[in-house]
């Protein structure tokens, strides 16, 4: 990851790498009650994070305990790069391999990523989204999902205190353009 290509592909992956090394692997070597307690607290905070972020994003959290468990496990950070591998496997197989087989839906944190983002990171994924949206505009089959791709490229669009404004603008634009 010390080359320019490695930095581009590996950006935002350092937490997953260090979490796996510092927390999970170190905890597996100790095998005591304090480690179990730490893992359970991490899972609880991960579940809380899933619930709060779903509400902030204007999505209803799932009623299925398995969805909560998988998202808590992912957001706790204890799986580290294993969840990145799960994301790549799910994207490459369209959900036929990975934790989504247990729940019937993709882990929420990875749902908005495209295949390019899963394999190469967010920068190449954004370039793929730009080409996808511009191609849809010129082909005349622009949809709400393309509108959402464009919206996700706007800086600060995901801040919880102004997200509602972006949601309203996106809905109104889609309605005005007569999109389904």
Image (tube, rainbow, N blue to C red):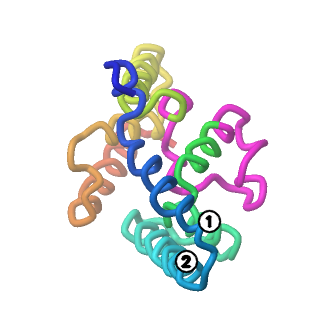
Q: Quadrant of the N terminus?
A: top left
Horizontal placement of 159 versus 124: left or right? left
Q: Secondary structure at mark 1?
A: helix
Name the foreground residue: 43 vs 67.
Answer: 43
How many residues crowd around disc 1 within 10 Å: few (fewer than 14), some, or many (20 or more)? Answer: few
Which tag, 2 or 1, sits closer to the chain's start? 1
Q: Position of residue 98 (x, y in %)?
A: 72, 48
Horizontal placement of 131 versus 37: left or right? left
Residue at the disc numbered 2: 35
Name the foreground residue: 134 vs 84.
Answer: 84
Q: Secondary structure at mark 2?
A: helix
The quarter holding residue 61 reads bottom right
The magenta stretch is 89-117
Q: Position of residue 142 (x, y in %)?
A: 45, 28
Q: Position of residue 64 (x, y in %)?
A: 69, 74
Residue at position x 54%, y 57% from top? 108
- The circle drawn on residue 14 is none
The answer to whether residue 90 is above or below residue 77 is: above
Residue at the disc numbered 1: 28
* Residue 154 magenta-highlighted: no
The answer to whether the residue labelled 2 contacts the one labelled 1, judged by CB atoms less than 8 Å apart, is yes
Residue at position x 63%, y 74% from top? 31
């Amino acid at each position: 990851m010390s080359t320019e290509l490695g930095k581009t592909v590996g950006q935002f992956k350092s937490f997953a790498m260090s979490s796996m090394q510092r927390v999970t692997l170190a905890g597996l070597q100790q095998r005591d009650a304090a480690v179990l307690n730490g893992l359970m607290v991490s899972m609880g905070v991960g579940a809380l994070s899933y619930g709060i972020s779903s509400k902030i994003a204007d999505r209803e959290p799932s009623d299925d305990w398995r969805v909560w468990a998988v998202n808590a496990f992912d957001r706790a950070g204890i799986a580290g790069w294993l969840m990145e591998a799960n994301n790549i496997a799910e994207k490459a197989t369209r959900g036929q391999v990975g934790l989504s087989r247990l729940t019937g839906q993709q882990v929420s944190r990875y749902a908005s990523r495209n295949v390019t983002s899963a394999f190469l990171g967010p920068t190449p994924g954004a370039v793929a989204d730009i080409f996808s949206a511009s191609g849809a505009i010129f082909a005349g089959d622009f949809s709400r999902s393309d509108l959402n791709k464009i919206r996700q490229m706007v800086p600060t669009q995901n801040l919880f205190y102004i997200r509602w404004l972006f949601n309203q603008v996106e809905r109104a634009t889609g309605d005005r353009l007569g999109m389904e």
